[in-house]
Image (cartoon, rainbow, N blue to C red):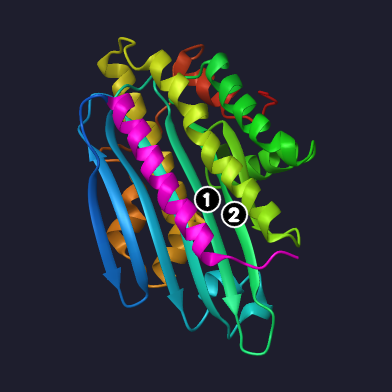
Amino acid sequence: MNPVDINAVKSYLLGLQESICQSLEALDGGAHFVEDSWQRELGTGRSRVITNGRVFEKGGVNFSHVQGSKMPASATASRPELAGRSYQAMGVSLVMHPNNPLVPTSHANVRFFIAEKEGEEPVWWFGGGYDLTPYYGFDEDCQHWHQTAKAACQPFGEQLYPKYKKWCDDYFYLPHRDEQRGVGGLFFDDLNDGDFEHSFAFMQAVGNSYVAAYQPIVERRQDSPYNEQQREFQLYRRGRYVEFNLVYDRGTIFGLQSGGRTESILMSLPPLVRWEYQWQAEPGSPEEQLTHKYLRPHDWA
């Protein structure tokens, strides 16, 4: 079994943040990411945020490395055997909210967790994935997103894409709305196949494929004309994004319970959003098609 190399993971994650920011900044062609490095008792981080861009209304690509002497409740609820261990957690997490409602919002995250206790073997795992949240559905966008995700998984086994695609559909689901947050993608957690280098390589494959999955979709839609009604629908649908992140998202809950930096944890929330009481889409409209067709688990690849 390969030894755990925390420094290699951290170096990769910092480089991933840098390369993704460079790609998205070039794609926007107007605004630049502003960096905010921070240090707290429990860890350090590097937050990068872009606002009021040509393409992106708001986006953030965050790196954090936090540690503590006691596992947070959100982690030990499903892994009670880890109670009492010290831990380190590091990852890159990003959310991009576009101006144009025909461009989907995207989210990605890759992370590493290690729990240690004197006299015992460390317990470690990788997690991550990415998912797409359109406001107006286009088959070719969904197909490209999922085909890229499938290709990233392919070298590691035929079974991984369908497994992690289903996990993503199950995870990004709002029970109180009985609907998916978006069209899914990949979600994996607790990845430890006994070989650190192999597990690490899979996490890297997912992280490295995000830009290839998202950039062509943005380029295809960013200059499409849209009207005020479509913009208002985008803001209405962003409400679902907020509901999921504040109520169900593991990363948000873990960040808050572990004493993380609130500004960075809540970076994922959109700058503008609206809720409307008992709003209903026009029958047969693209707005109705979003929930009736696209926000249903589907074999896009």
- Region of the chain picked out in magenta, as a range: 1-28
Q: Position of residue 242 (x, y in %)?
A: 39, 46
SS class, disc 1: strand
- Horizontally, residue 90 falls left or right of residue 44, namely right
Q: Position of residue 256 (x, y in %)?
A: 39, 67
Horizontal and vertical percent for residue 250? 51, 58
Residue 277 seen by the camera: no
Asked if 78 appears above or below 9 in the picture, the reply is below
Camera-nearest residue between 273 and 10: 10
Which class describes the residues within 10 Å of circle 1: few (<14), some (14-19), or many (20+)?
A: many
Q: Main secondary structure of the magenta part?
A: helix
Q: Amino acid at mark 2?
A: Gly
Quadrant into which the N terminus falls? bottom right
Q: Is residue 230 magenta?
A: no
162 sits to left or right of 287: right
Nearest to N terminus: mark 2 or mark 1: 1
Tell me if I can see residue 49 in this picture: yes
Q: Residue at x 30, y 22 (%)?
A: 231
Residue placed furthest toward the right: 158
Amino acid type at circle 1 is Val
Question: Does the magenta portion include 22?
Answer: yes
Residue annotated with mark 1: 110
- Asked if the residue under mark 1 is in contact with the one under mark 2, i.e. CB atoms within 8 Å, the reply is yes
Labelled disc at residue 127:
2
Tell me: 160 left or right of 146: right
